[in-house]
Image: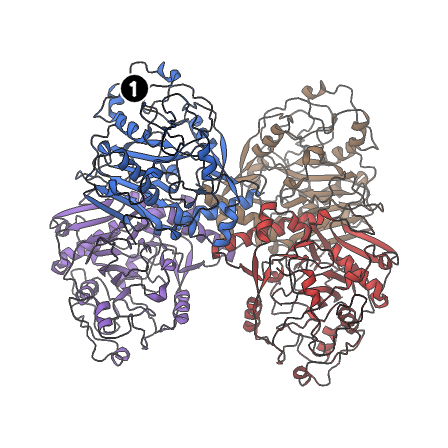
Chain colours: A blue, B purple, C brown, D red
Amino acid sequence: MSSVTEIQEHSTSSRDGRLTAVGDSSDGKPRWSNQSFDFTLPEDLRRVFPDYRTPDGVSAYLYAKEQGIQYPNYSQWKMEPYVEKTGFQDKGALSNPEKSALLRAAKEVIHLTPYCGTEIVGLKLTELSDEQKNDLARLAAERGVVVFRGQDDLFIREQIKFTSYFGEPHIHQQSGIIPDLPWSHIVYKDETSLNGLRSQVWHSDVPYELNSAGLTTMRFDLLPQAENGDFIGGDTLFANGYLIYEALDPQFRAWLETLKAKSSGLGQAAVAARLDMETRRPAFETEHPIVRTNPVTGLKSLYVAENFTTEIVGLEKRLSKSILDYLFDHIRRCLQFQCRIKWSLNDVAVWDNRSHFHTGIFDYFPKTRHGTRVIAQAERPYLAENSKLYSEVKFQGYSTT
Amino acid sequence: MSSVTEIQEHSTSSRDGRLTAVGDSSDGKPRWSNQSFDFTLPEDLRRVFPDYRTPDGVSAYLYAKEQGIQYPNYSQWKMEPYVEKTGFQDKGALSNPEKSALLRAAKEVIHLTPYCGTEIVGLKLTELSDEQKNDLARLAAERGVVVFRGQDDLFIREQIKFTSYFGEPHIHQQSGIIPDLPWSHIVYKDETSLNGLRSQVWHSDVPYELNSAGLTTMRFDLLPQAENGDFIGGDTLFANGYLIYEALDPQFRAWLETLKAKSSGLGQAAVAARLDMETRRPAFETEHPIVRTNPVTGLKSLYVAENFTTEIVGLEKRLSKSILDYLFDHIRRCLQFQCRIKWSLNDVAVWDNRSHFHTGIFDYFPKTRHGTRVIAQAERPYLAENSKLYSEVKFQGYSTT
Amino acid sequence: MSSVTEIQEHSTSSRDGRLTAVGDSSDGKPRWSNQSFDFTLPEDLRRVFPDYRTPDGVSAYLYAKEQGIQYPNYSQWKMEPYVEKTGFQDKGALSNPEKSALLRAAKEVIHLTPYCGTEIVGLKLTELSDEQKNDLARLAAERGVVVFRGQDDLFIREQIKFTSYFGEPHIHQQSGIIPDLPWSHIVYKDETSLNGLRSQVWHSDVPYELNSAGLTTMRFDLLPQAENGDFIGGDTLFANGYLIYEALDPQFRAWLETLKAKSSGLGQAAVAARLDMETRRPAFETEHPIVRTNPVTGLKSLYVAENFTTEIVGLEKRLSKSILDYLFDHIRRCLQFQCRIKWSLNDVAVWDNRSHFHTGIFDYFPKTRHGTRVIAQAERPYLAENSKLYSEVKFQGYSTT
Amino acid sequence: MSSVTEIQEHSTSSRDGRLTAVGDSSDGKPRWSNQSFDFTLPEDLRRVFPDYRTPDGVSAYLYAKEQGIQYPNYSQWKMEPYVEKTGFQDKGALSNPEKSALLRAAKEVIHLTPYCGTEIVGLKLTELSDEQKNDLARLAAERGVVVFRGQDDLFIREQIKFTSYFGEPHIHQQSGIIPDLPWSHIVYKDETSLNGLRSQVWHSDVPYELNSAGLTTMRFDLLPQAENGDFIGGDTLFANGYLIYEALDPQFRAWLETLKAKSSGLGQAAVAARLDMETRRPAFETEHPIVRTNPVTGLKSLYVAENFTTEIVGLEKRLSKSILDYLFDHIRRCLQFQCRIKWSLNDVAVWDNRSHFHTGIFDYFPKTRHGTRVIAQAERPYLAENSKLYSEVKFQGYSTT
């Protein structure tokens, strides 16, 4: 079992020079840096769209349509094979536990439910200081999701820049892309999606990757509307994975902590193949601990998802299925650790994708909803020995219970 | 299989003279009437609290505490054996399909999600005309739940009077009561409740009764608060049972329509016995159709609940459990037909308890939350042959999709 | 739903001239004939083993080993695409209900359990008259399996000839073969089989074919032995599918009779591919009624198997799995309809593979057990409207209960 | 976790003087002794049947019928409260590992299947020496069940005496009795039993007792017959619990070894109450380790049963059910560790009821089958740390694999 310390001892291997380790921080540990994020496309992709440039101030979806380009775009290009990246350190760890720089600057702080979800009123993400961003990373690790309404200037390029502060932005190995901005995943169901119910399941994003999806941002620039103009439908649910884990029996938790599960990208690749989407890298399966530690809070959370976790390593198929079905059902039943976000235009959710679950709600077909999601990649999942349960710690700077 | 017509041909048998059939309506059918609702207590209960009177303008909970009376109160008294009441006609059936009297009077009509939940802004329930109440019954049958915020004058006695317009108010056979107002069910967990999770399950209320819970009102006069004074926790979920039913496979639906399930009050009675609560009437089990017709919309909905439905009649125990577990899981998975109500003081929910599911969310312990629920009893569940699916009809007066 | 009559109205389409319809029977219906069975190999296969000939009086397994040939053999050759064969009539239908020709000739008739399994003592299968064979087909349809001990002259070629009296002998699309006798399936686990537990499951053979496996024979020429020479291990279980069906709830049976299930050869093909076995014909999936009629007894039986039935047609994946799991579990629990055959050398089991289940028992590894199975193909599964339950009929000529 | 050593250090507390500890054995440990078994009835029962005496040489069932006495008899009498008995030592531990005294005296030793069941030919149980009995206890612990055919002189009183050599004979707390011989449990379904399917489930007997059923004998004196006089129906299945345990995943086994399960007598008592049978002692529930050690072989076996094990201690209800259902299903699927005993008159099965499962097969109704079972009580279940898996040991004196 790897520990936080072990992981942090490895230096950062930057894949392409855009995100580099800077070793001169106060504690001598390598750090991710987003200073140099320059939107240089992977070479292979550059040949596909040499001149395309999504402008600011418009939905990437509407612009692509206007340009007569397939959207999301599935042009062929190849990604490099996956290699684990070490040396990640969460920005939240740089924050003070009170998160004062962020919380005191807010006009209002609204906690949506006792155990999940906080809305910060009166701040622009584009204007946050590094100190405030660090606080935000910590707050997201604590509250699961932090909502900022009406971020009308966080255009897609700004969103990528903003998110890359927290880690190298992830490029999806199958999904359709914005032609010149593959670091953004498109949250949009088109006519190939039927009704989206395949995606209506509690999960963390791309768990089959070696490095986890970490801090993640999502912003909607098109939303379904009722006849009276109200936005309606397409809410998103989030849930606290620390408490979902803690709500399991102690004897069961002790066993789960000894087990790994397989997260598979094969299912997603099979769907991609069926839809003639492009697979940029062969799909693979990864073994992760079922219970993982969040490096900022030091808390244990449950890390399985019905649409990605295919088996518990070493268990007979039927037993594995029984245990996983129990866990998936447990997640669904834990209403008391959820919150529900209703979206308005340009609202942004910032969440910690490692220790919290989320699911879309697909109640708006055939209306259109379009958003952009950017994932900052984080550490490879690990379970540290001294990890705690949610009820054993007290977060500072606010109280919801 | 009984039909709507058959049911309406029976005349109303009023149990105690307070709710009487008035035969002179335009179509000659018997009607429930609430003209004479007079708060006369069952004789047996009258002896227990001869002088107690909950005043207006105060939470029944706070008043009882102040009076030094156990709350909720479990004093002994006996209810008459249960007899089916025939002749019920839903007030919604008297409304025009446009529901104009209600919808046009509203300052604003906010639909919470496409398939469930509507908020009516700017109206007082105490001031609704009968025509508007009829519209409300229809709207509740269509939208599941209708919310009216800040009903600060719908004191508990007013709430009982208001609800009794829609049907005889129900008295629970076990639950603790407000000493002088047994027609109100108390929504409150005290120190005997642990954490309420036993109640965090999708259900319709008291389904073991012969006559269903029909239009139901719930109002909160005490809510949990965060340290900054915000109300937080204790939201309620509602779900559209028509669509939950329609989302099942057609071949499966065809079979379900031939089956009945047992709704049991024994579990609730066993809990009552364990807690030294009073059982006012021996608990019983009732067989109801699994799929029932809503008399106002004519739509079929699924009518089972994990905490009450114990078996499918005639099926081997394990098969019955397999089918029911599938249905309960299906209900939990249908996020796309749900809405979530966040409460403020004196908010009132009005819902159709026959065709829609709801569940509390118990995320606020050990804080206090207190509300009062009044149920207007309706018809005995039946499945009419000409019943329709949700997608086969179009509701009038508004559009959410 | 096709009926017996419909099926019998179609004339036999003989695939290769070896089995031909003879139309001059008393009732003018086409009949299968085995008069001309001549061991002519499919042309493609003939090129592979032009000179190989398994002699009589020796285990095909031992002979092949001696000849230095891979066994079972997986050489490449191609089978024609599958086409439904119509016009099958069961030989059992030609028998008299008393089955006197067979039963009276036997030295002894031992019924193994009340509902399954009969041993006929004192007869040689090679010496049975057509009348006795017809009786045997009927007895197999009634008792599931009929055992003849010590058939030391039913060499593999004789076994194929004998079985082909009852229908065209089946050639498996993947399994290893005896080089010159592909009409025999080899019952033998070699070093690629691990422990055989994959096959330890209640089933009927090759249910994905359009035409069912009908009367089937199995004979063992090598059996595991204990140190004292006793034969030990490798028994076979059979079970009465009529009663397994009848033991289900009437309301459930009524629904099952409206459903079809998919029998898949894909799993078997996937295993074959993984083991570099030859696939002679692309694997396919077939939809069959879940409840089928036996044309001889007119009885309904359950027709699903855990290793072949992948889904119930038209049902959502999880519901389909719930129902199938219930059925598979039900089959396993029905000990009261099973019998267990302990084998000695040259014992032969003759069974009706349509209405009865069987499973091997893999308790003898790493010892060797070798047998040969020949399947006479029968009608395509159908459910006739006037089919009966087991308890509604009384078989003639013997009594076991 | 108690160990073998701990258990053997406690001295025997004899309940009623009939079975006493004799301390002069070679190792100074207390021993059970059956020298003084004298058929003295519990005082309370003595008053009920002061003069009744079942004679030798006749079925207790036929004799009771002849005497006009209800059979099995349910007269009222009270048993003392249950107290754990310590100091048990298995007679098998006194045997030599080769079991020569027994095996060499046998005319023939037939192993029924590789992993379960041995038939000893040519010996009378009434004539076995103590040394041979000790060998038999060891053989039963190894082979699960040992069959002796045609024991026509092991009348019921002899059977009780014989079995009491191995431990104090058990008296059942609910079941009907032979009026003067309550130490024998009657294996007989009468008209109140419907079809016995409730008992067709893999189990070990009376697992809710503190002290386990140990060596057990069963003898049939009435069996169902076909019209030709053959015995048919009512076979019994046995299964090897060591291998059933070993066939589970190693990671799962490691967890199971930390868990206890509740064995309940409440279900049996509820059936008794419904049938107006007598409860001689309040029913109770006992927590036992899920994996237990056999004191003779030192092997671990699985110790749960669908009809008695109600929950895993400390696990949430649904998780507990998932795990137990998996285990029950696993037991049913393990055909490769079973054997099936077909009975003839006066056949006797001797089995180790701690480490092996058995189930009746109820395929003979409405015919009559009557047998007598006597249980020698053994140690309280424990899991010793140095316990082994079946495949890690080699039994001596014979070989079946």
Residue C392 left/right relative to D32 = left
Q: Which residue is mark 1?
A: A69
**Callout 1: helix, strand or loop?**
loop
Image label count = 1
Quarter of the figure with residue C315: top left
The reply to whether residue C1 is in sight is no
The reply to whether residue D327 is in sight is yes
Counting from the top left corner in percent of width and height, residue A118 is at 27, 45
> Which amino acid does the dot numbered 1 rest on?
Ile
Q: Residue at x 86, y 62 (%)?
A: D123
Chain containing the residue with disc 1? A
* In the foreground, B138 or C115: B138
* In the foreground, C75 or C383: C75
Counting from the top left corner in percent of width and height, residue C200 is at 65, 43
User: In this rendering, is residue A199 above or below D104?
Assistant: above
* In the foreground, B296 or B81: B81
Quarter of the figure with residue A94: top left
Dot 1 surroundings within 10 Å: few (below 14), some, or many (20 or more)?
some
User: In this rendering, is residue C284 above or below D242?
Assistant: above
Counting from the top left corner in percent of width and height, residue A222 is at 24, 32
Quarter of the figure with residue D303: bottom right
Counting from the top left corner in percent of width and height, residue B306 is at 40, 56
Residue A165 left/right relative to C123 = left
Residue A244 left/right relative to D350 = left
Q: Quadrant of the C terminus of chain C?
A: bottom right
User: In this rendering, is residue A164 above or below A299?
Assistant: above
User: In this rendering, is residue B242 above or below C278?
Assistant: below
